[in-house]
Amino acid sequence: MSSEKSGADILVEALTDLGVEVVFGYPGGAVLPIYDAIFRQGKIRHILVRQEGGAAHAAEGYARSTGKPGVVLVTSGPGATNVVTGLADALMDSIPIIVITGQVPTQLIGTDAFQEADTVGITRHCTKHNYLVQDPARLGAIVHEAFHIATSGRPGPVVIDLPKDVQIASARYAKPASPLRHKTYRPQTEADPTLIEAAVAMLAAAERPILYTGGGIINAGPAASDGLRELQALTGAPVTSTLMGLGAFPASHDDWLGMLGMHGTYEANMAMNQADLILCLGARFDDRVTGRLDAFSPDSQKIHIDIDRSSINKNVRVDLGIVADVGSAIDDMIALWKAKGHKAADTGEWQRRITGWRARKSLSFPASDHEIMPQQAVKRLYELTRHLDPVITTEVGQHQMWAAQHFGFEAPNRWLTSGGLGTMGYGLPASIGAQVAYPGRLVIGISGDASVMMNIQEMSTATQYRLPIKIFILNNQYMGMVRQWQELIYASRYSESYSEALPDFVKLAEAYGWTGMRIEQPGDLDDGIAAMLAADGPVLVDCRVAQLANCFPMIPSGAAHTDMILHAEEVIGEASDEAKALV
Amino acid sequence: MHITEQAAERHTLSIVVDNEAGILARIAGMFTARGYNISSLTVADITEDHAVSRITIVTYGPPAVIDQIIAQLDRLVPVHRVTDLTELGPHIERELALVKVVGTGDHRIEALRLAEVYRARVVDSTISSFVFEVTGNPDKIDKFCELMREVGLVEVARTGVAAMSRGREAA
Ligand SMILES: Cc1ncc(C[n+]2csc(CCOP(=O)(O)OP(=O)(O)O)c2C)c(N)n1
């Protein structure tokens, strides 16, 4: 029988048993016993952030780039409330993170004690699950269960709220036998074979098929991306992806259509509209993808494979819903396709239509020789770094969409962005998380002048741990995406979207011990990027870009895929109330 | 601009859950967070060790929304199973109500007569008031309250619906 140890030691031991190598955190009164236990051990590395919100996004970046869960440790009250945005973000994008929050001692709960917050109450609806631990003897099992829940099924954030007295009280801990069998939680991972059979038959009969892929493929692990490539090769179907799924299918492939949705390519959206079969793999028909629902792909049959039953038929009624791990379902489909001896259908006519749509060159943008076009900056960044296989993070706004449009990804886990929640302030800490996971890799954060300010304090974290992240700001001195909507929908009334009083980013970089650079002229772009890559240590690049550039193509909120705006000239000045009411 | 709504159906859901702290907030909060309706909700533990509870929720919404509600409930970690009793077909729904009626003379006599028709029991009385206890399906209770309104109803307390499938199978 193992001897008793403190709750704090049990926590650290359980984390170690679970293979945790890194914890992103910030100390405080209610977690001092845990910080002491961390001080006394040698296996887990603690990364001290500068604000707890940074820890949550860093853990997300770590998780998304590695496929392993990210772990966060924060104190009670303000420490816990500061991570709420990261929890909501991870819930939306299905990112496995485990957040351990300190809590006031059990007997003080409910008394408005110093730094007390109802953490389980506040986080109940922005986590996949949460726990308040009241018994140190249960702690070890709860930690293991929390990891199981965060990483299996549809991944997501889990909070463990740990009162200070439970951290100090002692109990026995033994590593539970794996795999865990939870009494109520049993996500379905294997597809029903009869449904796979139906799906394969539909796919084999399709004349105009399209594979619509999402973040689920990334979550299913690199093997699912391999499976996707094989399924595509067998069927010859063109592939599009959501923002979250970029990298699952190689951007250099002839059958890659680019991203779909609001800022997706013309060919991707038209192909979705005109397809006779949509095979949705780990995506969720979100409003940014579908546009106006009653006009969304009216003539197609739709198959949806998702690990979360509630995603099926939520926004779009489908003809065939399959609950399964998407990687496993793809493998089943491949096996059956081969067993049945199906051949890729003759999709010549379909391919010709797609070629016609591609010819519209929807990602083209006006050239300029006196100012840097932001799209051009992303393109050059891509061309000059692709051989280095970088990890790219973004903030939220136009730069994020330009990065999605103009940076090509060949493999999964290279693209870290806040899709569902659209959280400005995600990118800088996510870059830190990815760089901690891969010290030797090139990590570039494509950023906006407004977003970068949201978690700018994390520059100090990068300095402390010598993390050589490169933050490349497309500085248009506006909250560009807000300004764009105001231009298109509110007759250019730019209410509060100008980035007034921006810091001197070069001096700011130097103040943090980073290298700061400014790129102002189109002719200096390549040299600037080269200088950024050559500098060791973290670099902040203030790349001054055309201030009023807009991100196209664009399907306005509530419009159909076929009502895409390709160029600025097609834009209306003021929208109806119905359009204004849409997000 | 006007906001449109779709035709709604009434469904009775039986949700068997692990009886952990915060479970009711988790379930009820999911309904509010996603804009679903709750007409009534009852909850009590149903096993000897108090470890499992049954929550019965009467909700309404278009069929697609009802499907979503079930799927959303089903993916909550402490939920053992969700049964749509309405979808399942014949099932029993019972509710208990306490109904206070104040009045004298003819009203009082009429109240007693109606109570008899509805098999309501008098559980409290004064010279000028009664408290009736009535059980039945929610329609019957609605109807009873409606009639009592004519003869001096002043207060109603209802338990919400407890429900179960018919036949030998446990749902
Ligand atoms: C935390 C948060 N607050 C507000 C918004 C709304 N929002 C979306 S994009 C955007 C502007 C972003 O500006 P910037 O970072 O400069 O990027 P740009 O669009 O100019 O590329 C804002 C305010 C958001 N997404 N996240």
Image: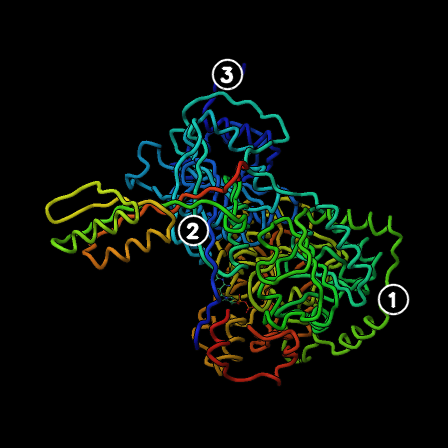
The answer for which chain carries disc 2 is B
Circles 3, 2 touching at the beta carbon (< 8 Å): no
Q: Is there any visible trace of residue A73 in the rendered image?
A: no
CA distance for labels 2 and 1: 52 Å
Badge 3 density bin: few <14, some 14–19, many ≥20, Cα 10 Å: few
The residue labelled by disc 2 is: B58
Give the colour scheme of this rendering.
rainbow
Q: Is residue A401 above or below residue B115?
A: below
The residue labelled by disc 1 is: A346
Outermost residue, top direction?
A: A1
Badge 1 density bin: few <14, some 14–19, many ≥20, Cα 10 Å: few
Q: Secondary structure at mark 2?
A: strand
Camera-side mark, 1 or 3: 1
The answer for which chain carries disc 1 is A
Q: Nearer the viewer, residue A306 or B138?
A: B138
Q: Is residue A513 above or below residue A33?
A: below
Q: Is residue A423 left or right of residue B119?
A: right
CA distance for labels 3 and 2: 50 Å
The residue labelled by disc 3 is: A3
The amino acid type, in three-letter code, at marker 3 is Ser
The amino acid type, in three-letter code, at marker 2 is Val
At a point 17% along the width and 51% down the height, the residue shown is B109
Q: Position of residue A233 (x, y in %)?
A: 84, 57
